[in-house]
Image (cartoon, helix red, strand yellow):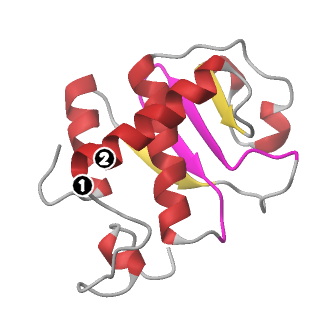
C-alpha cells in the first residue's frame, strides 16, 4: 500500500504488478439509474477503468477502487449487451472482459466492494469525515482540480 496513500500511486503499483498499462477514464455519458457508474475493461494490451462524470472526488475514488476490486479478483462475466452502445469507439473484438458497476446484487459486485473497503482500511485513508489539511479533496485523492 503506498504511504502516504494516493490513488495514482496505487494504480501505478497495480499496473506494474500486472505488467500492463492501467488507464483511468471518465465515462462518456452522464450517470443514470440504469447506467453504470463504473466499468473495468480488459483488452489484450491494457486495463481500462471508467468512472462516472460529475461525481465528487470521494465517489470517484470509490468507483475506481471498486473496479480495481474486480481486477484483483479477476472477475470475468460474459460480455454484457449494449457495451458498444455505451462506448461506441471501443472495438468489441479487443475486449477480453467487461465489468459494469450498477448494483451490488451479485457475489462479484459484493466482492469488489469489499476489496475497495479493505484497500481504504489498509491505507488508513480516506475517512469520509476526515478533514483535508492538504487542500481540496480532488488534490488529496490525486485527481486534478475539475478532472
The answer to whether the residues at label 1 and label 2 have Cβ atoms under 8 Å apart is yes
Q: Secondary structure at mark 2?
A: helix
Task: Answer few, some or many: residues within 10 Å of disc 2's Cα (few below 14, many 20 plus, some between 14 and 19).
Answer: few
Residue 47 part of the magenta-drawn span = yes
- Whether residue 57 sits left or right of residue 16 in the image: it is right
138 over 42 or under it: above or below: below
- Going 38% across and 85% down the picture, which residue do you hit? 136
108 over 112 or under it: above or below: above
37 over 104 or under it: above or below: below
Q: Give the camera-side residue of 21 and 71.
A: 71
Write down the region rendered in magenta: 34-54
Name the residue that disc number 2 marks: 121
Name the residue that disc number 1 marks: 124
- Going 44% across and 26% down the picture, which residue do you hit? 71
- Residue 50: x %, y % from top left: 57, 47
Quadrant in the picture for residue 116? top left
- Going 78% across and 32% down the picture, which residue do you hit? 83
Amino acid at each position: 500500500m503506498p504511504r502516504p496513500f494516493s490513488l495514482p500511486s496505487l494504480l501505478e503499483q497495480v499496473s506494474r504488478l500486472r505488467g500492463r498499462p492501467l488507464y483511468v477514464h471518465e465515462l462518456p455519458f452522464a450517470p443514470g439509474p440504469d447506467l453504470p457508474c463504473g466499468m473495468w475493461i480488459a483488452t489484450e494490451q491494457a486495463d481500462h477503468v471508467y468512472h462516472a462524470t460529475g461525481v465528487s472526488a470521494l465517489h470517484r475514488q470509490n468507483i475506481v477502487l471498486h473496479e480495481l476490486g474486480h481486477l484483483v479478483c479477476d472477475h470475468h462475466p460474459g460480455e454484457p449487451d449494449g457495451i458498444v452502445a455505451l462506448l461506441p469507439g471501443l472495438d468489441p473484438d479487443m475486449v477480453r472482459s467487461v465489468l459494469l458497476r450498477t448494483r451490488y446484487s451479485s457475489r462479484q459486485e459484493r466482492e469488489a466492494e469489499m476489496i475497495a473497503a479493505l484497500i481504504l482500511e489498509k491505507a488508513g485513508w480516506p475517512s469520509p469525515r476526515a478533514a483535508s489539511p492538504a487542500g481540496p479533496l480532488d488534490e488529496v485523492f490525486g485527481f486534478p482540480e475539475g478532472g
